[in-house]
Amino acid sequence: KNEVEQSPQNLTAQEGEFITINCSYSVGISALHWLQQHPGGGIVSLFMLSSGKKKHGRLIATINIQEKHSSLHITASHPRDSAVYICAVPTLGSYNTDKLIFGTGTRLQVFP
Amino acid sequence: DTAVSQTPKYLVTQMGNDKSIKCEQNLGHDTMYWYKQDSKKFLKIMFSYNNKELIINETVPNRFSPKSPDKAHLNLHINSLELGDSAVYFCASSRLGPQAGELFFGEGSRLTVL
């Protein structure tokens, strides 16, 4: 069992739909990262959060540290949101010796 | 003006050859990383450097040798390439470690070993 689990693995939506991607982790963490990988392959950091909620445009990320769970929401989805969304958590350790553990990703396709 | 740039973007080579991938960041970050993304798109840390010093070596075969001439550069040299080395290799950097710092990724280098 991976230390970072994402669901669903694949997601198909119609343009305009509200999207939710979930991430659960088993390790103790101080922060969680949401990344986006476009079909072209490049990876972009969307959020790094350690508590509560963060919003950037149509993207919202929430985290519940006690429940070890985070969600990424996309409001008014658009075909250009089609990508793989990856959750990642750093293992706890002394500063600057942490490593990120990645989820297996959620492939999102938004159709017009 | 690319923040993290890696070259080459594509690399096709024969088994047994030696190849290098270069990475440079112009963000002034202290920490740089190499990640490997396998055919199932799963990302895994290979190496982490902080200010030219090796911090993490995640049980990578000795055939892989990272080199950091200065904190803006982290190159990856691979000896005696094997079929299983075929993957996409991503360089990344962050100002702080992943507990506190956002990561910036290069575009990836797709290595195909024939």
Image (spheres, coloured by chain):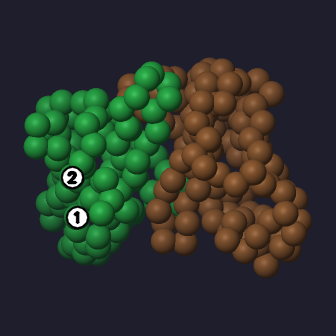
Chain colours: A green, B brown
Question: Which of the 4 quarters of the picture holds residue B33?
Answer: top right
Q: Is residue A27 left or right of residue A71?
A: right
Query: Disc 1 or disc 2, which is closer to the eye?
Result: 2
For disc 2, the chain is: A
Q: Quadrant of residue A15?
A: bottom left
Q: Position of residue B109 (x, y in %)?
A: 68, 57
Q: Secondary structure at mark 2?
A: strand
Above or below B80: residue B34: above
- Asked if residue B6 lies left or right of residue A40, the reply is right
Q: Residue at x 46, y 46 (%)?
A: A44
Residue A24, compared with residue A63, is above or below; it is below
Residue indicated by mark 1: A7
To the question of a shared chain for discs 1 and 2, the answer is: yes
Image quadrant in which the C terminus of chain A is located: bottom left
Q: Please give the label number shown on residue A24.
A: 2
Residue at point 29%, 70% (across, down): A9
Counting from the top left corner in percent of width and height, residue B55 is at 60, 30
Secondary structure at numbered mark 1: strand
What crowding class fits label 2: few (fewer than 14 Cα within 10 Å), some (14-19), or many (20 or more)? many
Q: Amino acid at mark 1?
A: Ser
